[in-house]
Image (tube, rainbow, N blue to C red):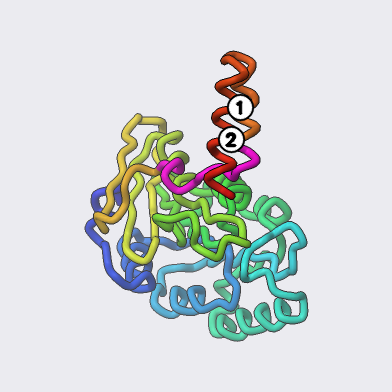
Amino acid sequence: MNSDQLAALSKSDRYALWVDIINQAGVETMLELGVYAGEFSEHILRHCPGVKRYYMLDPWKHLDNWNKPLNVNQAEFDKVYAEAMRRTDFAAERRVVLRGRTVEVIEQIPDGSLDLAYIDGDHTLKGISIDMIRTYPKVKPGGIIGGDDYSPTIWHHPERFEPTLVCPFAAYFAESIGTPLVIFEQDQFAMVKPAAFEADFRIIDTTSRYGAPVLKRQIRPPLRDRIMMIQHLGRRIHPANVFRKIRKITAQHS
């Protein structure tokens, strides 16, 4: 399956989309990274009989350095884990449960063995970087890497949480390996792993809602950082101009 064939399968429902992709691509071995309660796992295992091995990777653990809404307490995570197991017990002979963080358990998957990797784990910049970089060698050439929360805004959650940076990181990752990035409805994305770098990067936006994957229009430096930047620039410009700029910024925030 190539990128244009992927784009032709666009659907408004993400479950139906991935069932189509998996069945039409003939996926037999796949990874779901970020399982939580197992709703997606159950749906795929029920509707994709061709999948013979389904890796379910998730820490199911409270993480002190993960600032996202789903970082619940450990007692709640144990309940969520039990639910994920219950939902997929009917396919116990097809699932492989990897309970741990990506860096701890990903090497239990052989390199070049996955037909598809679906990434829906930690959507911070740190998380998506680790997940995509460590998962990529596990996917065979011609296999598919995709995932969830390719949000057109980094402010996917309230500001007290870390921003969601699947977009633009996934786009930059696709450009780095020389393959098109396909964007679907419901913040889904996918790319085909090339056999070799072909410099074929482009964005295929089936939603027509996404612009260029840049951050500047979404981020305004806080007052302190803007003052520090101006002070740094003051090494090269007249001090009077530095103080004028600082007074102007301060007045705007008073």
Examine the rendered structure and indicate whether residue 54 appears above or below residue 144.
Answer: below
**Residue at 55% over, 72% down:** 94
The residues bearing labels 1 and 2 have C-alpha atoms spaced at a distance of 6 Å
Which residue is at the front of the view, 152 or 98?
Answer: 152
Dot 1 amino acid type: Phe
Question: Looking at the rendering, which quadrant does residue 12 occupy?
Answer: bottom left
The 10 Å Cα crowd at callout 2, few under 14, some 14 to 19, many 20 or more, is few
In the figure, is residue 111 to the left or right of 101?
Answer: left
- Magenta residue check for 223: yes
Q: Which residue is mark 2?
A: 247
CB atoms of marks 1 and 2 within 8 Å:
yes
- Tag 2 secondary structure: helix
- Magenta residue check for 65: no
Examine the rendered structure and indicate whether residue 163 appears above or below residue 247.
Answer: below
**Residue at 51% over, 44% down:** 220
Q: Which residue is mark 1?
A: 243
> Which span of residues is magenta-colored?
214-226
Q: Position of residue 211 (x, y in %)?
A: 31, 47
Examine the rendered structure and indicate whether residue 158 appears above or below residue 89.
Answer: above
**Residue at 45% over, 52% down:** 145
Dot 2 amino acid type: Arg
Q: Position of residue 46 (x, y in %)?
A: 44, 80
